[in-house]
């Protein structure tokens, strides 16, 4: 199922054929859509910039999530309890609502749909940087970190053995990683361990690296395997002496798709 197939028809008609990056859905609220970086509202007559012409969501977020899960929400409860659900096309549904002490949502009241795009955005300079060492891509949400990471994996796989640890199922979309070994839905700890033990990688690629993942990065680097990863961060206030950067030779500050700045270690001087 595609992400738009679980939405009301009037929303699907608004976004049909458009390059959708993100959709914001809230119970009884206006539907907002990000298309190529610009925000619009959905209406009966298509997209509009006018709030007065915007149409309110006329179905519940519960119904949309149920449709996205093929009416089997319980089969995806563990994933949804972490605040998201990933569809087969790689679209991620981030959710909010009434959270119960039992670790599940009693009601969904908001959905943020993030739509993946396969874009050739890795420059020759970035590819050369990834070939020379371990690289961390840093930036806030929505600036194209995952898009860049996916394209880097595609380029590296032309020459090297690349293992992609796709914990949330957002990297392996549209079969673009057909030349990579993909470990889908595995945690980083399990994915790194399996890659190092069984798949003889030259590179391990993963998304959304956290501080708790440092030990796995260190183990890979000490094994002679290069790591390319992303991490959330404010590019204007980033502290490049933070522990998370200890094992990386370069940091790519991602401001938007196609707008990058490369910082080299150990002196962390701008390239």
Image (cartoon, rainbow, N blue to C red):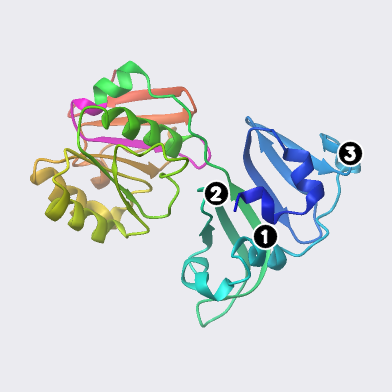
Q: Do tag 3 and tag 1 residues touch (Cβ < 8 Å)?
A: no
Q: Is residue 175 above or below residue 154?
A: below
Identify residue for label 1: 110
Q: Do tag 1 and tag 2 residues touch (Cβ < 8 Å)?
A: no
Q: Quadrant of residue 164?
A: top left
Rendered residue at 80%/43% (across/down): 42
Q: Is residue 90 above or below residue 146?
A: below
Query: Does residue 207 appear left or right of residue 130 in this picture?
Result: right
Identify residue for label 3: 45
Query: How many labels were placed on the picture?
Result: 3
Q: Look at the image and say whether residue 165 sits in the magenta stretch.
A: no
- Crowding near the residue tagged with mark 2, few <14, some 14–19, many ≥20 C-alpha atoms within 10 Å: many
Q: Disc 1 to disc 2, how far (Cα)?
A: 16 Å
Q: Look at the image and say whether residue 131 sits in the magenta stretch.
A: yes
From the top left corner, tell me how far across and down residue 63 is, in percent.
71, 66
Answer with mark 1 or mark 2, whichever residue precedes in sequence. 2
Identify residue for label 2: 91
- Crowding near the residue tagged with mark 1, few <14, some 14–19, many ≥20 C-alpha atoms within 10 Å: some
Query: Does residue 81 appear left or right of residue 11 in this picture?
Result: left
Which image quadrant: the C terminus?
A: top left
Q: Disc 3 to disc 2, how far (Cα)?
A: 25 Å
**Magenta residues?**
130-143
Rendered residue at 39%/36% (across/down): 150
């Amino acid at each position: 199922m595609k992400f738009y197939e679980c939405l009301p028809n009037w929303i699907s008609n608004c976004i049909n054929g458009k390059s959708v990056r993100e959709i914001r859905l809230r119970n009884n609220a206006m539907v907002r859509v990000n298309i190529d970086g610009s925000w619009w509202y959905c209406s009966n007559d298509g997209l509009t910039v006018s709030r007065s012409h915007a149409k309110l969501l006329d179905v519940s977020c519960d119904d949309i999530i149920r449709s996205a899960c093929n009416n089997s929400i319980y089969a995806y409860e563990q994933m949804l309890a972490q605040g998201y659900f990933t569809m087969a096309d790689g679209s991620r549904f981030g959710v909010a609502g009434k959270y119960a002490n039992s670790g599940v949502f009693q009601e969904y009241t908001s959905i943020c749909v993030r739509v993946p795009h396969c874009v050739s955005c890795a420059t020759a300079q970035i590819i050369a940087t990834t070939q020379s060492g371990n690289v961390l891509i840093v930036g806030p949400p929505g600036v194209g970190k995952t898009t860049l990471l996916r394209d880097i994996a595609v380029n590296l796989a032309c020459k090297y053995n690349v293992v992609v640890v796709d914990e949330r199922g957002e990297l392996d979309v549209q079969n673009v990683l057909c030349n990579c070994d993909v470990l889908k839905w595995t945690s980083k700890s399990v994915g790194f361990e399996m890659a190092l033990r069984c798949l003889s990688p030259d590179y391990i690629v993963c998304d959304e690296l956290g501080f708790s993942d440092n030990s796995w990065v260190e183990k890979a680097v000490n094994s002679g395997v290069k790591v390319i990863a992303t991490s959330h961060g404010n590019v204007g206030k980033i502290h490049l002496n933070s522990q998370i950067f200890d094992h990386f030779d370069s940091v790519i500050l991602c401001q938007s798709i196609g707008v990058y700045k490369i910082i080299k270690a150990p002196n962390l001087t701008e390239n």
